[in-house]
């Protein structure tokens, strides 16, 4: 195998691990095995190449600290799932509902300049503008603009969340 070739058995093993991990957290992996296999192979290739599993649909810098937001699962997965029912690269999916937008998922990752500007203000008030959501069933807390579609702990829907702080 070439320098960045991935053993198909490793891809299958990683697909199985990701599926189990996703389901335990209330997520689903794309049921199209061919697409999922290609995405997982890309994750493994990036991990081999860069030392971390960055999103296979985005161009990593090669510096982990600059790419933390695109290490799978990326920072943009949940907003994509909530709005479109699928993440940007298509690895994670939700069942689509009538309130979800149809069509391609737009790139949410800010430009390099915008990310650098965010780093400068980090720590001052990292959660500014984000409410804290509370799952009324299990007590799970998260700081996001919207509650998750499914609670990753007890799997109830977003209608069971309320604003805790914000």
Image: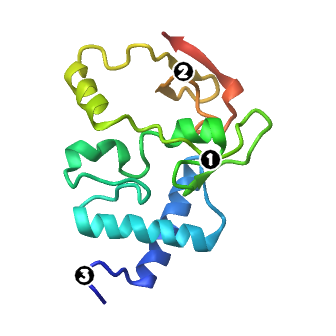
Local packing at callout 2 (Cα closer than 10 Å; few below 14, some 14-19, many 20+) is many
Element type at mark 1: loop
Foreground mark, 1 or 3, reads 1
| Coloration mode | rainbow
Name the residue rendered at 57%, 14% in the picture: 163
Q: Tell me which numbered mark, 3 or 2, is placed earlier along the sequence.
A: 3
Alpha-carbon distance for marks 3 and 2? 45 Å
Q: Tag on residue 104?
A: 1
Rendered residue at 19%/50% (across/down): 63
- Sequence order check, earlier mark of 2 and 1: 1
Residue 64 image offset from top left, x and y in percent: 22, 50
Residue depth check, mark 3 versus mark 2: number of the one nearer the observer: 3
Task: Identify residue for label 3.
Answer: 3
- Kindly identify the residue that appears in the image at 44 percent across and 13 percent down: 129
Whether residues under marks 1 and 3 lie with C-beta atoms below 8 angstroms apart, the answer is no
Q: Is residue 91 above or below residue 149?
A: below
> What kind of element bears circle 3?
loop
Q: Which residue lies most toward the top here?
A: 166
Could you say where residue 20 lies in the image, as x and y percent from the top left?
54, 61
**Does residue 91 appear to the left or right of 114 in the view shown?**
right
Asked whether 13 or 125 is in front, the reply is 125
The crowd level at tag 1 (other Cα within 10 Å; few <14, some 14-19, many 20+) is few
Q: Are marks 2 and 1 in contact (CB under 8 Å)?
A: no
Label 2, on which residue? 133
> What residue is rendered at 77% in x and 40% in y?
97
Residue 85, image x and y in percent?
Answer: 66, 44
Is residue 113 left or right of 82 when viewed as pictured?
Answer: left
Say which of 89 and 44 sits in front.
89
Cα distance between the residues tagged 1 and 3? 33 Å
Considering every residue shown, the one lying at the far right of the view is 98
Figure quadrant of residue 8: bottom left
User: Secondary structure under badge 2?
Assistant: strand
């Amino acid at each position: 195998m070439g320098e960045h070739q991935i053993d198909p058995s490793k891809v299958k093993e990683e697909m199985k691990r990701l599926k189990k991990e996703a389901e335990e957290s209330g997520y689903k992996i794309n049921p199209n095995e061919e697409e999922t296999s290609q995405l997982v192979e890309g994750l493994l290739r990036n991990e081999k190449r860069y030392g971390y599993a960055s999103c296979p649909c985005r161009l990593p810098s090669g510096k982990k600290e600059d790419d933390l937001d695109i290490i799978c699962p990326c920072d943009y997965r949940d907003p994509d799932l909530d709005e479109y029912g699928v993440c940007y690269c298509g690895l994670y999916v939700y069942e689509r509902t009538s309130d979800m937008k149809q069509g391609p998922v737009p790139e949410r990752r800010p430009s390099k300049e915008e990310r650098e500007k965010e780093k400068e203000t980090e720590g001052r008030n990292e959660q500014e503008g984000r409410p804290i959501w509370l799952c009324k069933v299990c007590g799970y807390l998260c700081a996001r603009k919207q509650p998750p579609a499914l609670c990753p702990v007890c799997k109830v829907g977003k209608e069971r969340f309320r604003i805790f702080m914000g």
